[in-house]
Image (spheres, helix red, strand yellow):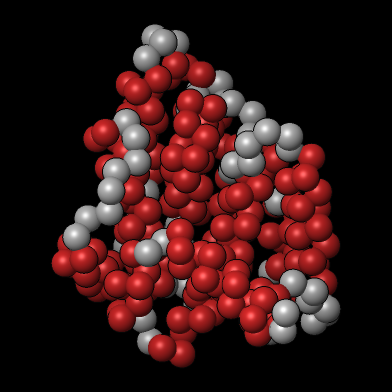
Amino acid sequence: MSDSAALDSFLDKWRARWPEWSVAEVFVAPARRDIAVAWFALLQEFEDALNIAGEPLPADAKLAWWGEELRGWAGQRSRHPLGRRLEPVRADWARLAEALPTLAEARAQPVDRNAGLAALSRYGDAVAAVEAGVLGRAPASRSIVAQALAMRLAEAGAAGIPMELRQGGNDAHAARAWADCLLGQWTLREGARERRLVSAFAHGRLRRLAQRSEPGALPSRASLLFTGWRAARGD
């Protein structure tokens, strides 16, 4: 497989997980679309390692490999197809590399809400710092954390809910309570336009999960367009 085809496969994998983007990318300048998708695809690789089901050793090895890879980007020594697109960006890749081990630690079920949020705080700070270089503006770190934990809730279910919320034995109620907590952490108006778009869609997914205690179907195309338009404006 050529480098171009390998890169496209990673970008397409992210687009398949976020079909909302195909509606909203009209609000993004064409020259910025590939770099934005490459960045979000990279973050998805990390979140996949966070939300691994079963034996964690392969995911831990993957995170360690990514740490080495990111450190190499400062010297333009990329090996991964995503690096072909992201490596030229002047950003603190080493800081992100140093934060990756916290993803493995964050798989442990947190004792309470504060512990759940704190587990990914270092990762959120690092992502925000690098995104300032990639997209030109830093998002709120707490929003990065909330979005990562929202994805964990959707993919890991009860394992991603703080223990204090599960004491009553009703996981559906606990999921709604955790989702409400994460929604309260989210700041939708900060960051670059591309971040605001993705954040708005992730926020919408979490709202639907909070309402139904399980992931809901995507809204209509017209609704997604309206959400994207508002996010692009910064409303």
Q: Is residue 9 above or below residue 207?
A: below
In front of the other: 170 or 90: 170
Residue name at image x 74 percent, y 72 percent: 80
Q: Which x, y percent locates residue 110?
A: 57, 26
Q: Is residue 3 above or below residue 96?
A: below
Q: Quadrant of the C terminus?
A: bottom left
- Looking at this view, name the residue that lies furthest to the top: 168
Q: Is residue 108 left or right of residue 174?
A: right
Q: Quadrant of residue 206?
A: top left
Residue name at image x 79 percent, y 40 percent: 57
Q: Quadrant of residue 105?
A: top right
Q: Is residue 12 left or right of residue 95?
A: left
Q: Is residue 51 above or below residue 39?
A: above
Q: Quadrant of residue 27?
A: bottom left
- Looking at this view, name the residue that lies furthest to the bottom: 31
Q: Which x, y percent locates residue 203?
A: 33, 51
Q: How many marks?
A: 0
Q: Quadrant of the N terminus?
A: bottom right
Residue name at image x 29 percent, y 43 percent: 216
Residue 210 visible to an observer of this rendering: yes
Q: Is residue 22 left or right of residue 226?
A: right
Q: Which x, y percent locates residue 74?
A: 78, 76
Residue 184 visible to an observer of this rendering: no
Q: Is residue 118 above or below residue 37?
A: above
Residue name at image x 55 percent, y 72 percent: 11
Q: Is residue 133 left or right of residue 6?
A: left
